[in-house]
Image: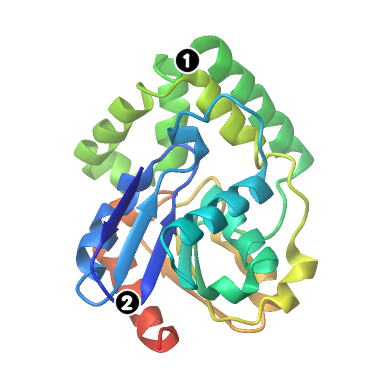
Amino acid sequence: MITDAGDGPPVVFAHGMLMDRTLFNPQLAALSDNYRTISYDLRARTDRYNESYNLEDLAADLNALLDALHIESVVLAGISMGGFMALRFAEHYPQRVNGLVLINSMAEPHTEAEREEYSALAKRVLDEGVQSERIRHIARTKMFGETTLEENHTIVDHWEKRWATYPPESVYHAMHSWIDRSDYTHKLPNIEIPVLSIHGKENTVLAPKRTESMLDTLPDARQTVVSAAGHSAPVEQPDEVTDAIREFLSEVVL
């Protein structure tokens, strides 16, 4: 499924592991005045959820989607694992990317301890399902910042209800698409297009400092830190995220 709105230079949004294309609804609505804004469901939110795949497979999926939509090139925005995929898309299909927006993402791999933790969590999801209270507690504390958890229960409750509908296999395979990914830092000098990093200051999953090596290595990169947001900044602070993307697009899109 895709959401396709507006007309103009195309901007494509790729969601993260526990989210779906509706995560970017605020950005699509706001930016479709000047741009063709497209958000699509990655494999975990489709009927292809129960199979093994990696980030390169997801990049190939996006390439096929652009072919189907008859789009030559885009600005690509990806959050978390969508950002991991976006870097690989820029490497394998450089002619199709005019700029990157990496939201709460990084080029470094997870540490060995993190890989062990997430592998165990993926197995627990498979055993218990996303609807279990223990899994939902872990998810909400990782996906949202302190401010959102304290002040915006509507957003948290909305996504908890969506998580409860996910088949556990969809989360399991999505997690394993990125858990063991390699370090991408050494490939960043080849990504010469403009890059905007947007990061939640309250992100406890990927602290802002973990983007430093990426920002230092990319030829043309800058960062906006969103003060009252965690790992799901597009819905936690939608206006601030949208404003940062709009400013970036005004400089990148011809």
In depth, the one of 229 and 160 nearer the eye is 160
Residue 111 drawn at (x, y percent): 75, 44
In depth, the one of 155 and 246 nearer the eye is 246
Q: Residue at x 61, y 24 (%)?
A: 122
In the rendering, which numbered label is found on residue 246?
A: 2
Rendered position, 9 above or below 112: below
> Residue 205: which quarter of the image?
top right
Q: How is the image coloured?
A: rainbow
Rendered position, 19 above or below 238: above
Residue 211 drawn at (x, y percent): 61, 64
Q: Secondary structure at mark 2?
A: helix
Q: Residue at x 25, y 34 (%)?
A: 158
- Badge 1: few (under 14), some or many (20 or more) residues near its Cα, within 10 Å? many
Rendered position, 242 above or below 220: above
- Amino acid at dot 1: Gly
For label 1, the residue is 129
In the rendering, which numbered label is found on residue 105?
A: none
